[in-house]
Amino acid sequence: MTSPPRLYFSFRSPFSWLLVERLRRVAPDALEQVELFPYWEPDMDTAAGLARHDAVIHYAPMSKAKHLYILQDTKRLATRLGLTLSWPVDVEPWWEPAHLGWLQARRLGGAGAFYDGIVAARWRAGLDISKREVIRDVADSVGLDGNAICAAVDDREVRDLGVDCLLQAYRDDVFGVPYMRVGWRRFWGFDRLADFLAEAGLHLEAGPGELARSSGRQDDEGGLSGVPLAVRELVGCYDNDTAGGCG
């Protein structure tokens, strides 16, 4: 039996957020036919679970130059999509609360609502989704049990689900997000959406040129106006990323 198309997303990655937003616009029903997998940098507990399967996260440090480019490119793409953006400052990120929370929300029938709440909190409000209180507030705001969602990080069954997701990512050679796979064919990055949809045979309601073209002009700060100084000062100081720099 042929497995459904897969889409690996991450709450960390701005390109993941933007691709899912674009996907919903050009093919609103596609997410119902795609198997979603969360992807993140694991903490020690999750990493130990992967190690028991002789698996790791395909990971490489990201240069300061690449990170600055990503900040600029994210702003450019968000503007084309008509989205406002508030930059989160992740000094000591812990990605389990959000991603295991999504797995818990899926078990409770609220994965979509929780996803929307988390991306709004992170990318529209600039909140720190490493904090349990932020996760709890988001879950409560979308009609889920915030305490149950926060408890996901302490639930061995949910932890094991998280390991399974990252193990599948390892087997699928995921090295960055957004990452899509149809059979043995793989598609990485925001600009590969149309190719992925075509390969998956998913209906495209809008043409591939649905993004309005920007002028291409940059502001006096090299396209980084609006990026908080705290974010720019930390570039290259703490942030390592998946190979390819999506995140």
Image: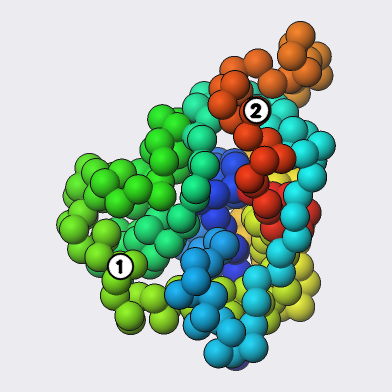
Could you tell me which secondary element the residue under label 1 belongs to?
helix
Quarter assignment of residue 74? top right
Residue 245: % across, % down: 73, 50
Of marks 2 and 1, the one in the foreground: 2
Q: Residue at x 55, y 90 (%)?
A: 52
**Residue where numbered disc 2 is placed:** 232
Q: Earlier in the sequence, mark 2 or mark 1?
A: 1
Q: Is residue 149 visible?
A: yes
**Residue where numbered disc 1 is placed:** 152
Query: Of all residues shown, which one is farthest toward the front?
Result: 237
Q: Is residue 210 visible?
A: no
**How packed is label 1: few (under 14 Cα within 10 Å), some, or many (20 or more)?**
many
Horizontally, residue 90 falls left or right of residue 66, namely left
Three-letter residue code for mark 2:
Arg
Three-letter residue code for mark 1:
Ala
Q: How many marks?
A: 2
